[in-house]
Amino acid sequence: MTGTTRTTDWEELVTSALLGTDRRPPPAAVLTPGKDAATALLDVAALHTVRRRAGLTPAAARPLPEPAPQDPRPSLPEAARRRLTGLLADRAAHTGSGGRRGAAPDLTELLPQWLAAANEKGYRAPASALPALLEAARARTDLRPAALRFAGARGLWLARLNSDWKFALRGAWGSAAASGPGGGAALPAPDDAIGVRKLWDEGLFAERVAVLTSVRAHDPAAALALLSGTWSTERAEDRLMFLDSLRTGLSDADEPFLELALSDRSRNVRTTAAELLSGLPHSALAGRMAERAATCIALDRSGSTATIAVEAPHECDAAMQRDGIAPVPPSGRGERSWWLGQLVESAPLTIWPRRLGGRTPEEIVTLPVTDGWGDELHAAWCRAAVRQQDPQWSRALLGTPAAPPASGPGTSSLAERAKLLAALSERERADWVAAFISAHGLSEAFQLLGVCAVPWAEPLGRAVVDALDIARDAGSYPWSFSGVMGLAERCLDPGEAARLDLLTATPDEPEGASPGAGGYWSEAFQRLVSTLRLRAVMHAELARE
């Protein structure tokens, strides 16, 4: 049998096993009188396997990892810990096979809400739950910020030991974890100059973003000094991420640094710096943009009605390009309209009332615009209102919620309207969307609902439920409302459950209704009610000491 221990003989055994002994007989040395070829092959393979394993030389033991850092946050109440275990187990068992969902709550969609509530309470993740938590975050990118914040510094420590979880150590997801209460345990205090400098010089990219964010929240000038000291040696993609972190707490004190970034060798960095500067209405760049935009737009009083006259730029010179104006338009877009749009969206909105006869934003957006420039001008004003987070201009461009969606003063795009709504207060946002739904129904409201604070304010929640009830009574095709129903499960105030019990009964199906629609609607409302009640229980479990 000694011949069967050679590598070549082992490969012959494997080949015979794969192809079958009828097509590839094993080596003659393997064959044993009284045994068929297949049995003899398996006997020799078993013997050879034992020999191979016995001949392995033990590798040197690796050094033990550093102990996991301490997490000072309080531990979960026992009921909440059991709930987390159940939610993570359900996620792992969920097959995503589709089909009818039934009346039971979808636990996979409750996990993000549970994590958000646990983070709000400041709890730490149980050590035993960290592997499942990291697996959940690996599978669902939307879970990562909340999951990694909840996992904290111990989650990052564990992620370094498994290459499957390396996503936690890079980019914004890692910074979201490191900058949270649990992650903060692994960071130096923002006023610990030595510790901050050491982590900034030696840390992983996620840790560097986290420490920059931490220092910026404590001392913006120190954060800028930290970033300025290594700016010229950073990679372009890292400079872009660091620059993006300045969006939080952006102020006039950031202007000198951002002005320097306008000359960066990376086009993306230059563009981002220009965008940030245009959000500072008193910056030099905003002033330059205001001068350029003002030469393009004026009030024409020559007719019986005042109009806005537009003369788009005829060139995009080097100074404009340095200030972030992209010279080459997208395919199908004219150069002059492309340059005009960028100038107007980068100019401070405060210049237009003075430029256009002392009118308010509400009056300005109703003025006729010459030569078909109206859509271009209004779209640029929408982008400016979003960038500058100007509530007055956002209201003017949104118009009244009762107006037909296609005839809004600023834009008919629901995505753009959602961005404009984000500049308003939470209550005003909810009231506007509630009125929009009451006037137009739910078919065009999904994107608008996504920017409303959770849980929805009572008028908004009532408007959504009433619209669903109307759709049910009208015999509407039920599955077309599944997205809104799922959103309601996540966003309605749990206190609304009792009021919705009446909707769980199976209604009579009107003539012409989709077959089985009544049963679907009943099932969907039953699931909505049971989900709201389960959410209430989850919040109560997290509130217990």
Image: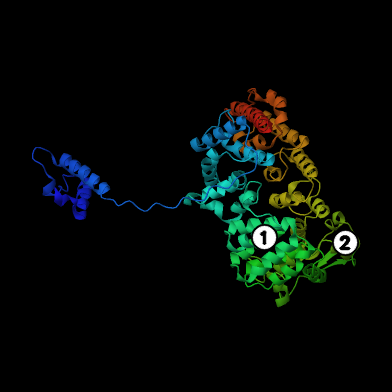
**Foreground of the two, 326 or 288:** 288
- Callout 1, which amino acid? Asp
Residue 190 location, x and y as percent? 70, 56
**Foreground of the two, 47 or 408:** 47
Q: Dot 2: within a 10 Å radius of its alpha carbon, few (fewer than 14), some, or many (20 or more) residues? A: some
Location of the C terminus (image quadrant): top right
Camera-side mark, 2 or 1: 1
- Callout 2, which amino acid? Pro
Residue shown at 71%/25% (left/top)? 498
Which image quarter: residue 112? Answer: top right
Residue shown at 60%/64% (left/top)? 201
Q: Are marks 2 and 1 in contact (CB under 8 Å)?
A: no
Residue bearing the label numbered 1: 244
Residue 353 is tagged as 2
Examine the rendered structure and indicate whether residue 492 appears above or below residue 58.
above
Q: Earlier in the sequence, mark 2 or mark 1?
A: 1
Count of picture labels:
2
Element class at badge 1 = helix
Q: Dot 1: within a 10 Å radius of its alpha carbon, few (fewer than 14), some, or many (20 or more) residues? A: some
Outermost residue to the left: 33
Which image quarter: residue 226? Answer: bottom right
Examine the rendered structure and indicate whether residue 430 appears above or below residue 325.
above
